[in-house]
Amino acid sequence: MSLLYKRKILLGISGSIAAYKCGHLVRELIKRGAEVQVVITHTAKDFVTPLTLSTLSKRPVYSEFIEDEQKPYGVWNNHVDMGLWADLMIVAPASSNTLSNMATGACNNLLTAVYLSAKCPVFVAPAMDLDMHSNGATQNNLEVLKQRNVEIIHAEFGELASGLVGKGRMAEPENIANFVERELKKRLPLSGKQVLINAGPTHEHLDPVRFLGNNSSGKMGAALAAAARDLGADVRVVLGPTQANLDLHGMDVINVTSALEMLEHMQEHFLRSCITICTAAVSDYMPVNKTNHKIKKTSTGDELSIPLKKTPDILSLLGKSKTSNNVLIGFALETNNGSAYAKDKLREKNADAIILNTLGKKGVGFETETNEVNVFTASGKTVSYPLQDKKTLGKTLFSLFIEEFNLTDE
Ligand SMILES: Cc1cc2nc3c(=O)[nH]c(=O)nc-3n(C[C@H](O)[C@H](O)[C@H](O)COP(=O)(O)O)c2cc1C
């Protein structure tokens, strides 16, 4: 999902020939799920019509403090409210005149008044002829704005409306949207952090068509992974075979079948991950031998015995190689004596926390949309979370992990 999804964006359009591209920009932002409110300068209306922009944004376009031509007469377009409404503001194209007004705090039109009122992150995409762009005054204004934490979406190199070639073209609408998304991601608490999660069941094959497995859907793991992604982390999910429709958008998903394959990929990525969460319901046993052909009913008599051996204990093996840079969390599912078992497991596996699923209750466990858990940390804390939607629980658990394990520290 785009980081612009459900964001309220103020799009300030000023008087550059590049304003004609704003129809595309509005569409691009809306395509990514944003709500767009256009504020346009008087001059910019010569380059793109408010009718086009209001049609595309599905909102009225504001230009003047008081829209004299409209009825009822003398309605104030409240710049303060607009500034506070927005989650972010993009001024694109930003003319040299508007950049100068923004840098000096001149409040001579609705766009600059809204800018001065806005408390949200502000981005500007300059657009002008190459000499206007390289002029010391323009560069100075950009520098002043940068120092005030305005993000500059740098002008691109290419052919300009004047026929000259150089740096001054407004960044293309798609590049503007990508730039804003990248910057928003950088501001998220887990930006630049690697998160590793295993999820789903494993299938331990007896023959090409039969396996030992379980009903794990992978939903809890996917909910935790989505929470980490939405906090800005780079998330890798090692996923066992599941039919569930999981939201793993924007993540690196490695599909595996068996416990051995899952172990291999978890070990490969473990040390570079700041937090690893083992949610997968890994089969405890696998057949000693796997036949290459289907075991025939006629060849086995009335009973069939299949020798099994233990699968590798992924959590325990990761715990053995853990350094001070790795937080390791495991899930446990017990029918009785759960908390004693969870505390033992914490120590034995060298984990930083164990999350215990309470089994046997309605709405808790494998294939459900909800879950109820108790978290036991190595520092001795126990935190209980009542029955709730797995997605909400994923977010709540990540807030706990960030705080408990200082995940946002460098
Ligand atoms: C045809 C034409 C194209 C223009 N293109 C640009 C431009 O690309 N960038 C710019 O900074 N100014 C450009 N200008 C000048 C601005 O429109 C002018 O400085 C105006 O005062 C800007 O007002 P505003 O910043 O309030 O929108 C252009 C003017 C005309 C007539």
Image (cartoon, rainbow, N blue to C red):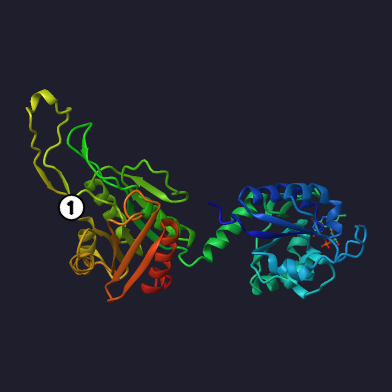
Name, please, the residue furthest toward the front: 362
Horizontal side of residue 36 vs 336, given as left or right: right
Of residue 38 and residue 42, the one placed in the foreground of this image is: 38
Q: Quadrant for ligand 1?
A: bottom right
Mark 1: amino acid: Pro
Q: Nearer the viewer, residue 93 or 236?
A: 236
Task: Name the residue beneath numbered marker 1.
Answer: 312
- Depicted 66 relative to depicted 261: above or below: below
Image location of residue 166, percent across then percent down: 72, 53
Q: Position of residue 257 (x, y in %)?
A: 27, 42
Whether residue 100 is visible: no
Q: Residue furthest top?
A: 298
Quarter of the image for residue 290 reads top left
In percent of width and height, residue 376 lies at 29, 70
The answer to whether any part of residue 64 appears in the image is yes
SS label for mark 1: loop
Considering the image in quadrants, where does the C terminus appear? bottom left
